[in-house]
Image (spheres, rainbow, N blue to C red):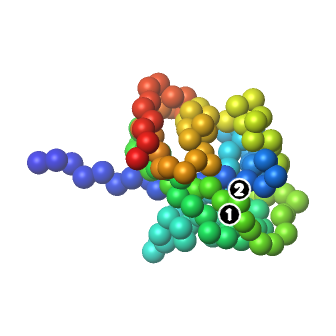
Amino acid sequence: MKERVAHLNATVCYLKKDNQVLMIKFAKKWGQVYAPPGGKFETGESPLDCIIREFKEETGLTLINPKLQGISYWKDSYEGIIFVYTASEFEGKLCSDSSEGQLEWIKTDDLSKIKQFDQNEKFAPYLFKDELFEGKFLLDDNCKVIEYEIRKM
C-alpha cells in the first residue's frame, strides 16, 4: 500500500512594476535572503485566497488578477508545494516595512544578482512568460538545491 503525503503548501507572488519586482529582504530568518511576498495556507483557503491575503499582510497592497505562473514541488525532510504567481496590477499603499523584513523594488535584470533561495533563483527565468512551469527540487537542510528539474506545462 502506498503512503499518502501531506504537503506543506505555500504561495508567493512576483509583483512587477516598471521593470522592477517587489521583494522582501528577510531581516532575521534565512540570513538576509531576498524572496517574493507570500506564505502558508490558512484553513479553507485556495492558493489564490492565500496569496491575496499573504501579499496584503506583508506589503499593504491588494493584488489584482494574480496569474498562476508555476508550481514548485520541493523535498527535504518534509515535502511541499509552492504555488508561484505573477502580477502587474495592484491597489493600495506599500508599507514602509514588512514584519518579515525590508521591502525593496529590484530591477528585473538584477534578480540573478541578488541572494535568493536556490530554488527561486532556478525558476526565475520562467517568470512573466505566457506559459506555466513545474519545478521539482531536492533540497538539503539549508534549502540548497541538490538536484532539480523544471519543465513547461
Tell me where residue 142 sits by quadrant: top right
The type of residue carrying mark 2 is Leu
Residue 33 percent coordinates (x, y): 71, 38
Q: Is residue 137 left or right of residue 128?
A: left
Q: Is residue 1 left or right of residue 124?
A: left
Density class for disc 1 (Cα within 10 Å; few <14, some 14-19, many ≥20) is many
Q: Which of these two is toward me, 125 or 135?
A: 125
Secondary element at tag 1:
helix
User: What residue is at 62 percent from the left and 69 percent from the top?
Assistant: 65
Q: Identify residue for label 2.
A: 15
User: What residue is at 68 percent from the left and 45 percent from the top?
Assistant: 35
Number of on-image labels: 2
Numbered disc in front, either 2 or 1? 2
Camera sees residue 53? yes
Q: Is residue 128 above or below residue 122?
A: below
Tell me where residue 116 sits by quadrant: top right
Q: Of the two numbered discs 2 and 1 on the same chain, state the one appearing first in sequence.
A: 2
Q: Identify residue for label 1.
A: 55
Q: Is residue 133 left or right of residue 93?
A: left
Camera sees residue 31? no
Q: Which of these two is toward me, 86 or 93?
A: 86
Q: Are marks 2 and 1 in contact (CB under 8 Å)?
A: yes
Q: Is residue 63 above or below residue 149?
A: below
The type of residue carrying mark 1 is Phe
